[in-house]
Image (spheres, helix red, strand yellow):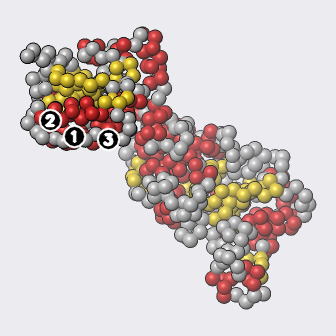
Amino acid sequence: MSTPASAPSFELPSVLGGSVALADLHAGGAAVLVFVSEECPTSAMTLRRLAPAVEPLRGAGVALVAVFEDPPELAARAARRARFSGTVLSEPAPYEVSRAYGLQTVPTTVLIDRDGAERERVVGWDRERLQELLARAAGGVGAELDVRLDGAAPQLKPGCAAKCAYDADTLALLARAGAQDELEEMFERGWSDGLPVIPPTRDRVEAMLGGLDGRQSLGPVPPAMGEATLERVAACAVLAGCRPEYFPVVVAAVEAVLDPAFNLGGQAVTTQPAGQLIVVNGPVAEAIGLNAGVGALGPGWRANMTIGRALRLVVSLTGGGFPGRLDRSTLGNPGKIGLCVAEDERGSPWEPLHVERGFEAGSSVVTVIGCDAPLSISDHRSRAPEELARVLGWAAAATWSPNWWPLGGTSVFVICPEHAQLFAQAGWSKRRLRNEIFEAVRRPAGELRWGETTPVVQRAADGEPIHKWERPEDIVLIVAGGEAGRYSAVLGPCLGMDAQIVSRRVRWRG
């Protein structure tokens, strides 16, 4: 009988760092090398079906090793997808190890005995032959191991061409495709809200921090209570697509939602659809390009979209408030991707929101509000302020539930400039408008006793008038939107958890 030939020796990078030599792999008994590539479907299937055998073989003294013809980052990602916990090595171009083993196809599985000799190989996926190879590997070190691979079809499946057999032009195309695949890795890691994100490289995170100490903590983020270090917040801002100049606004928004009065934990796990609205006031809004005009609640403005998104990524990635996991929202709403708006202070006839809340007019302030998605309110015909106030109020009457009176929470009205000017021309202040809306929206208790209703309604006499809100102060008014078009909006409340509106000053130097 001829003596088995020695397997070509090698030393390749491990995806865990450092390098691993062939001699290290079979030193304990034997090694099974599975040559694969990330883009080959048969390679992926083979690793998935071999994965359950990793630990039994390791216990018997046999190393099960995936040798990828790919860079380490692609190899690591493919192994994670396959749930393959064996040793994972990366072979760089020009694939000299694959060439030394005479590879034409991946996957190719090679059994190396304790003396470093090649004993057997299987090309492609062949379930029966691979079972025999693994059993022989265990038997070669004196272990009795009944290896049963996944019995699902197929029994046989051909592989793909090994990269060592590719021509130079094809290899160049593969290298470019691999370099562009980092966005897919973000999805694989779960670092996304369902939309593509920007990979948070060290350089990008450091640029976002702008010299701040990334170890500084803003506190634990409910509901999972992950620590909101500035580095983590910066990483979420990078993922969201923020520019570094937006970061002070993101930090202020995170500080605001972490105030216990905001009850982020309740908002993050409720079956309600509520998300978080960010309202930005002061010089910082204009300086960083926040939109308060046309399409203020919609897409098209990087600052608005990415600041709102960054806050939501902090909630979902650091706080664990991810839909289908700790976030149990029945429907959710598009605003949970991120909702940020600047108030149109120049176009508003009234004091801005932050001044109402006790801040100086020239200060930059973020206010966060737990609320539902916007409901558009069209009114192009009202000519008297009393009439328009009634239209706005009654549009909000159905929010949360048409019979849930009083709400017991906050409604946010975004008043468009044309509507705001009608009130201004009549000399109405914000307080006057708030009171008029409050008084206009009342119904007799007897008309509210069907479907879902409140204890207040249940206790009241049939003819007793019930207001939609408990008090006028539950009506929040801001001005935003395009100069043309009489469309305002109302955002319904987040109820049942005593979630307060919270404002924080932006630490920004203009």
Residue at label 2? 138
Type of the residue with mark 2: Ala
Label 1: which secondary element: loop
Residue at label 3? 150
Q: Quadrant of residue 97?
A: top left
Q: In the rendered view of the protein, which quadrant contains the N terminus?
A: top left
Type of the residue with mark 3: Asp
Q: Earlier in the sequence, mark 1 or mark 2?
A: 2
Q: Is residue 58 left or right of residue 179?
A: left
Q: Earlier in the sequence, mark 2 or mark 3?
A: 2
Label 3: which secondary element: loop
Q: Are marks 3 and 1 in contact (CB under 8 Å)?
A: no
In this rendering, the count of numbered labels is: 3
From mark 2 to mark 3, how far is it between C-alphas?
18 Å
Label 2: which secondary element: helix
Q: Residue at x 30, y 23 (%)?
A: 123
Type of the residue with mark 1: Val
Q: Residue at x 42, y 10 (%)?
A: 168
As rendered, which of 13 and 353 lies closer to the eye? Answer: 13
Residue at label 1? 147
Q: Residue at x 53, y 50 (%)?
A: 312
From mark 3 to mark 1, how far is it between C-alphas?
10 Å
Q: Residue at x 47, y 20 (%)?
A: 176
Mark 1 burial class by Cα count in 10 Å: few <14, some 14-19, many 20+: some
Residue 284: percent from the left, percent from the top?
62, 44
